[in-house]
Image: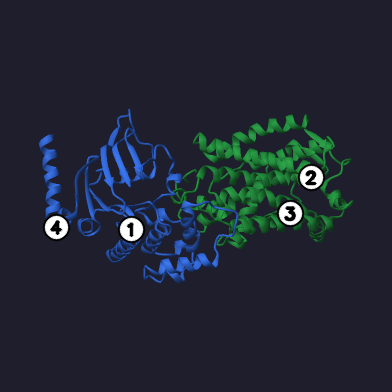
Amino acid sequence: MFDIIRSFVELIPVTLAQSLIYAFVALAVMIPFRLLNFPDLSCEGNFPLGGCICGTMLAMGYSPLAAMAVGTLGGFLSGASVAMIALRFRISSLLAGIVVITMLYSVNLRIMGRSNIALFSYPTIFDLIRPGLNDSLPGKILVLGLAVALVLGLLFAFMKTEKGIALRAVGANLDMAQAQGISVWWTTVLGVGLAAAFASFAGTVLVQSQGFSDVNIGFGVVINGLAAVIIGELLLGRHSVARQLLAPVVGAIVYYQLISMCLAFGLAPSDLKFASGLLVLVMLAAPTLMGRERAVVREKVS
Amino acid sequence: MLAVKGLRKVFFPGTPNERLALDCVDLNLAAGTFCAVIGSNGAGKSTLLNAIAGQFPVGPGRILLDGEDLGREPLHQRARRIARVFQDPMTGTAPGMSVEENLLLAELRSGRRRFRFGLTSARRAHYRERLAILGLGLENRLFDRIDTLSGGQRQAVSLIMAVLTTPKLLLLDEHTAALDPVTADLVLKATIRVVAEARLTTLMVTHNMHHAIDVGDRLVMMDQGRVRLSLSGKEKTGLSVEELVARFRDKDDRILLAS
């Protein structure tokens, strides 16, 4: 028992650093889902897209900043296309997302030319901030924590601007938003694009942090992101913009520690997906199980 | 101001459910006219309002606002000049957002939304002043989420939202029908007041004969997608509910004769 606790405690900082990267993915799940009422799963493809673009560009000798900018932009375009597909062809946002994820797998392989690239020998954004930062866990946690705080601050400020309030109106009531002169098309396309940009940004950071890029890094991130959002909302609620924005970050931090705990208790890494799925299922089922909401036969999908 | 010319709308064309909702509707409203629209269910009243607002494409026929053909201009662009209050208080307001945020969205309806902080103290003061007109104490609830307000209060806020900036045209689609009699009366009185204040050109659909006669300076009765009766001036002011109901009957008899 003591060994289990010790191995878990030892892993806390590593897990924290990891969860700060995945916090951006959780944000990318939350924004379309909660703020735009347009559930989008495409971060499963946008996350590796950012990683693949960034890895390839680093290997070609581009600066980490350029690689990250292009990687993030790639996610924006991919997210915007999910929204455009769903709106133009009137198909469910979930289905549009799945189509794009599938197509992105081929795109990602095309970009990299192979399934993975080692990046140990190239300078990363961490080296750019301070040489040797990538090997210093406390330094990395500090930098990532600041990045998360900065993004949250900017997002919070944006949600209070005229444009941000219009974006939230689209998620709250489509009819009302249109009647107030807001273009639902542009708001959704730009909003989902922005969210997807966070996912691909996380991808660019992850490949630099772990020192290699792989087309499969996205596998299962959407369920992790969803779990983080749900845990965060359970802990913080979602009754204000601040809480709604903070929830995915707090949720990601807690969720990855829970996963780490499962590993410490001897769960095989390959069983983790099942555990994550089960966790999300229990969280989603909680309201009906506790009888707070009457179960409906079928939820209306988008 | 508003001119509707030979407007037709067919729902589900080419299917067994095909239905002629608007059949050559002609309507002219001078600037500052407050027009009540009555008619039985399915007469095309709401369809006419939705067509003017741009909810769906229409044709043939034209809708002109200030002499300008609205054509295929999408709903959200028309909203710059046309304000609406819906029948359902839930449709007109954004839940989960505060009263002041809802009002801000309405204020920006006709303008551009920028990357700048929205709720300034000047705006808040303005919103308080406007809400105070209602006499419901809503000026003290700016920060509350709008879904914590009652249906009547939400509808009252919707009305203030619609007239916050002066729209070219105000569309009221049975906006008091979902409210209890006392609240309905209150919202209607507020409507009369704000419309008169800004001399708004207004189309109000109603099922209430008293409202149709007492409110506004024009009365239009629709039936089967057509304007059957249009009264203004003395003809309208001298009208009694009995006479108006008789006109409805008259219409029914004609339908019987025609069938």
Query: How far across and down, in percent of the image, does residue B177 sit?
Result: 29, 56
Residue behind mark 4: B238
Residue behind mark 3: A20
Colour chain A appears in: green
Residue type at mark 4: give it.
Gly
The alpha-carbon separation of the residues under discs 4 and 3 comes to 74 Å
Same-subunit check for callouts 1 and 4: yes
Q: Is residue A206 above or below residue B155?
A: above
> Can see residue A237?
yes
Q: Residues within 10 Å of mark 3 (few under 14, many from 20)?
A: many
Residue found 12% across the figure and 47% down from its top: B249
Residue behind mark 1: B199
- Front tag of 2 and 4: 4
The alpha-carbon separation of the residues under discs 2 and 3 comes to 19 Å
- The front one of A244 and B224 is B224
Residue type at mark 3: give it.
Leu
Along the horizontal axis of the image, is B252 left or right of A173? left
Query: How far across and down, in percent of the image, does residue A45 sit?
Result: 67, 38
Q: Which chain is blue?
A: B
- The front one of B143 and B108 is B108
Q: Secondary structure at mark 2?
A: helix
Residue type at mark 2: give it.
Leu
